[in-house]
Image: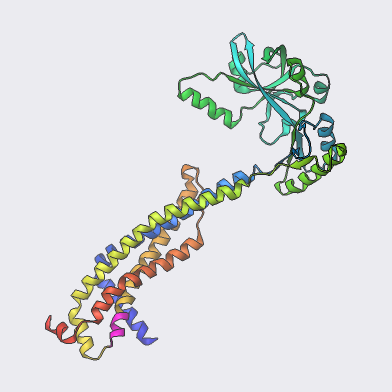
Amino acid sequence: MGQFLEYVKMALDNIRSNKGRSFLTMLGIIIGITSVVTIVSIGNGLKKDVVDASNEQNNTVTIQANEDEVTDTKIITGDDIAYLKTSLNDSVQSVSAAETSIGKTTTRKGTFDTYITFTTPDYENAQYTSPLVKGKYFTDNDVSNANPVCVIDEIAALYLFGNTNVIGMSLELAVDSGIQEVTIVGIRETSDDMMEVEQTYQMMGMEKSISTLEMPYTTAESFGIPLDAFSSVSVTVYDPEDASKTASSAVQILNARHQNLGDAPFMQQKPLNLSDMFGSIMDGVTAFVALVAGISLIVGGIGVMNIMLVSVTERTREIGIRKALGAKTGSIIFQFLCESAIISGMGGLIGILLGGALTALISALEIGGIHAQLSWPAVVVATIFSCGVGIVFGIYPARKAARLSPIEALRRM
């Protein structure tokens, strides 16, 4: 132990005597470790943000007709949807179904292509919808009476009428073979997706010409579209952990209500595991970028080897005297390996501290909206790797020093 401490002391003394050169030797290691720690931390932060965002989308389950059991998949009626809403517990936020169509809307400002969603009243609370900002949503009574009412978003109101004070106003809607006057009862906040579409059109110097409407599904009949049942129903729960249990209950309820169609006329639509998929993608991207950044560690290691070779040349006299006094080959090797390991280890430590500081700064300032998260496994790996670089790249200079003949070394004095 005493001999080891002596080697460490000798190595530190030599590093202090050549501060500038030692720092420049460490620089490659410092840059490499800082890059790896920072990149992995940013990758972890991005992964967490992406996975959290995708998990927020996992509280909606879809129950659909089983095509292997039934020939006509449109078998989920409005009564089925209402029964599901009543039967499922309070954890359910909404139970809704929808069919979409394309039509044209005409107002005093012109004619616009229109995306129509024929749906149920609970669609107001569905997961992917934005909140109402004016008016109200259509009701069960509107559905029962097939009232020609609709809800539009703010951008649609601006394009159709030039303002958003349009509650009670009418528009002419043409879908397939039917044309009908429709009254606006509610204004929905424009979703982020629609805002992005709008911004894209503006950047291209084009005017957006697509409006969106939501209407009672029973009004589809007046346009010549028979719609008395749906092929699937979406159930949104408040807590994503309840989604699987709720889906199973919904399947059982619908199967019981449609026993005449077979043993299992309904099934849960298999959800995409977005969090795992995005997590795997982010892990792959982070690993690749970290590997690229890690190349600088190899460059730093070559720098360590180069400086140690210079050190061997400069210390030929010292080596010759030590070998003449009986120093073993292993002792010479260990001395130089100890010095190269300390240089790399110190560079690694500085790199870890800088990487941690950059991670904290990026997270605090939310640069690019990123919440960087320090990866302790990356810190441990970086520490081991930095010391390993010193040992691996110090072997050749150490062996060269140890192989010097005492006579040859003293002759070079």
Question: In the image, is 18 to the left or to the right of 58?
Answer: left
Residue at x-position 28% and y-position 64%: 303
Q: Position of residue 296 (x, y in %)?
A: 34, 58
Most common SS among magenta residues: helix
Residue 293 shows in the view: yes
Residue 294 occupies quadrant? bottom left
Q: Position of residue 278 (x, y in %)?
A: 56, 47
Q: How many marks?
A: 0
Pick the quarter of the image with the C terminus. bottom left
Question: In the image, is 375 to the left or to the right of 145?
Answer: left
Pick the quarter of the image with the N terminus. bottom left
Q: Report if residue 21 lies within the magenta region.
A: no
- Image vertical order of residue 182 relative to residue 89, above or below: above
Residue at x-position 66% and y-position 31%: 130
Identify which residue, 315 or 85, lies in the foreground.
85
Question: In the image, is 130 to the left or to the right of 237?
Answer: left
Q: Position of residue 243 (x, y in %)?
A: 73, 46
Residue at x-position 76% and y-position 21%: 226
Identify which residue, 135 or 86, lies in the foreground.
86
Q: Position of residue 231 (x, y in %)?
A: 75, 32
Q: Which residues are magenta?
A: 328-334
Residue 100 occupies quadrant? top right
